[in-house]
Image (cartoon, rainbow, N blue to C red):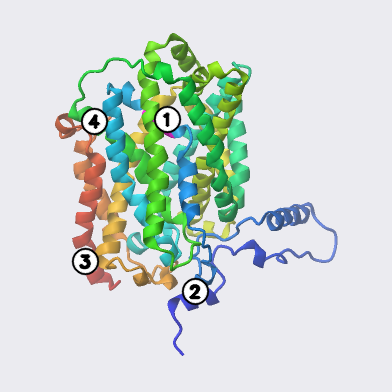
């Protein structure tokens, strides 16, 4: 009797670990004295078993394990990841760039609605193919060349985690009136993140289901307390096209990278889950809180110079300081809400760090043998010192970071989607699950890398950054991320045809 690819996949133990519930007897000891290492190992496995820590690594999820029916989890996850003070910080960049509140709000609305299409669509592929986002990328970038976008994705997500840790640390420092340093605040946020991200998919979705509620309440109170001052905006000059497009690039740099990890959160859903439902939940969960809170951030940014108290608190601890100033009329309850707002960032940190641990396993072949949860410790070990260093000149460092991530991720997505729609006809059944870790069955990846790299021949002249403004961008503003996406996709089609002709796959 014929055996399908999915059935063959189910017959094999997943490469890179399986669910802990199937491995409760995995730890045994030899006769003789019990070593310290054995005790540590036994204790770790007890924690894993009792906590239902996810041990599965990056292997495709077999069909029989794609059993989650609660599709609304996708909405609450994306909502919680964005219903916090991170979008407020991004919104504040608009007025700082010379845009009025009205112009900032319009840029936010248009670019967020446009760029959310990418992560919302890629979320729909998770249940159909059961693959993490960067594993799917192997079907265009190949088994080994995919390490390049994986590394860039790791750098991007780690950068976001650092930004979030700094903002959270600033909030905790602000509410303590200087009695708690930003450094200590960063350490607290990072360690709590470690606990949540350690557990995995099930606990992540459970946490995100409820994490947005206190965040929503605290943000409403903050907007209400500071409402009368938000109306006092600094006058701004009419917006120039270059300023609009450059700020739009910031919006894209916030939204587009979500697409590079979108299917990581949907792989356990049932394969027959409605794609339309997943798309709508993802789109609304991403776009709605982002638009509202970035617009609030733009209003805050435009009001700071006209409020001396806000300006003073902003100068002391930036985003945390301004939130503390806005909530000052609420007294002690207001300070409590600032602490709540600091910890609302965990919704974003936990989900992002979950994907980071998966990407670590994909970076180098040998790392797939290391349990996913151990990389949570590695991430926090990186986050803490880098976040402390980045806290100085925070907004300048953030803008320099954002200046780069929108370009590479757009080029990467142009390639992945061109492969999906042109060469796989948009059919998830054309992804052979047996090939995911076999270089002889996957593409070479040369076409993917070449098309992404060559697209920068137009991207670089179209970039408008503090350290570089290309000749095209001097006239148009920053249109680098748009060109990266379109040009890489157009180049990939003929280059992939040549690759298939010579490689046969």
Secondary structure of residue under mark 3: helix
Horizontal and vertical percent position of residue 377:
60, 44
In the picture of the structure, the residue carrying the numbered disc 2 is: 9
In-front residue for pair 267/83:
83
SS type, badge 4: helix
Tell me if mark 1 has few (under 14), some (14-19) or many (20+) residues whose alpha carbon lies within 10 angstroms of its own.
many
Q: Which residue is mark 4?
A: 244
Question: Which residue occupies the extreme right position in the image?
Answer: 32
Labels 3 and 4: the sequence-earlier one: 4
Q: Name the residue that disc number 1 marks.
A: 88
In-front residue for pair 487/41: 487
Q: Mark 3, mark 2: which one is toward the viewer?
A: 2
The residue carrying mark 3 is 497
Range of the magenta residues? Answer: 87-91
Where residue 225 appears, as percent x and y from the top left, is 49, 21
Report, in whole angstroms, how far the alpha carbon at label 3 lies from the one at label 2: 29 Å
Quarter residue 29 falls in: bottom right
- Give the CA distance from mark 3 to mark 4: 38 Å
Q: Quadrant of residue 102?
A: top left
Q: Secondary structure at mark 2?
A: helix
Which of disc 3 and disc 1 is earlier in sequence?
A: 1
């Amino acid at each position: 009797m014929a055996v399908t690819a999915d059935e063959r996949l189910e017959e094999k133990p997943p490469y890179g670990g399986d669910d802990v519930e199937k491995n409760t007897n995995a730890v045994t000891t030899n006769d003789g004295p019990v070593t310290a290492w054995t005790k540590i190992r036994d204790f770790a496995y007890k924690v894993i078993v009792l906590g239902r820590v996810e041990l599965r690594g990056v292997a495709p999820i077999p069909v029989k394990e794609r059993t989650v029916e609660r599709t609304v989890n996708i909405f609450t996850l994306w909502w919680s990841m964005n219903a916090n003070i991170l979008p407020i910080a991004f919104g504040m960049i608009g007025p700082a760039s010379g845009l009025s509140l009205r112009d900032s709000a319009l840029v936010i609305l248009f670019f967020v609605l446009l760029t959310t299409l990418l992560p919302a669509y890629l979320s729909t592929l998770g249940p159909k193919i059961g693959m993490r986002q960067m594993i799917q990328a192997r079907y265009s970038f190949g088994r080994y060349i995919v390490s390049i976008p994986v590394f860039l994705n790791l750098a991007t997500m780690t950068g976001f985690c650092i930004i979030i840790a700094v903002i959270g640390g600033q909030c905790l420092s602000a509410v303590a009136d200087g009695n708690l340093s930003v450094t200590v605040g960063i350490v607290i946020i990072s360690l709590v993140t470690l606990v949540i991200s350690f557990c995995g998919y099930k606990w992540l979705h459970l946490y995100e289901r409820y994490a947005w509620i206190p965040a929503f309440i605290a943000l409403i109170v903050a907007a209400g307390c500071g409402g009368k001052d938000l109306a006092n905006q600094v006058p701004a000059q009419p917006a120039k096209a270059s300023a609009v497009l450059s700020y739009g690039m910031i919006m894209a740099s916030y939204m587009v990278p979500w697409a590079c990890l979108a299917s990581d959160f949907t792989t356990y859903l049932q394969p027959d889950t409605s794609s339309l439902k997943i798309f709508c939940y993802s789109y609304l969960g991403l776009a709605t809180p982002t638009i509202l809170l970035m617009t609030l951030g733009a209003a805050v940014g435009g009001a700071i110079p006209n409020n001396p108290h806000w300006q003073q608190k902003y100068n002391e601890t930036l985003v945390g300081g301004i939130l503390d100033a806005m909530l000052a009329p609420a007294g002690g309850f207001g300070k409590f809400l600032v602490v709540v707002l600091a910890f609302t960032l965990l919704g974003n940190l936990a989900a992002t760090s979950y994907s980071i641990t998966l990407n670590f396993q994909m970076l180098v072949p040998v790392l797939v043998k290391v349990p996913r949860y151990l990389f949570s410790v590695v991430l926090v070990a990186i986050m803490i010192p880098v976040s402390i260093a980045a806290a100085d000149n925070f907004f300048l460092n953030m803008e320099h970071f954002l200046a780069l991530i929108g370009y590479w991720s757009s080029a990467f997505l142009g390639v992945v989607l061109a492969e999906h729609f042109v060469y796989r006809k948009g059919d998830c059944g054309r992804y052979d699950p047996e090939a995911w870790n076999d270089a002889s069955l996957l593409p070479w990846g040369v076409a993917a890398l070449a098309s992404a790299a060559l697209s920068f021949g137009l991207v670089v002249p179209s970039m408008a950054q503090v350290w570089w403004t290309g000749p095209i961008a001097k006239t148009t503003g920053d249109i680098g991320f748009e060109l990266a996406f379109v040009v890489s996709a157009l180049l990939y089609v003929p280059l992939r045809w040549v690759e298939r002709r010579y490689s046969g796959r």
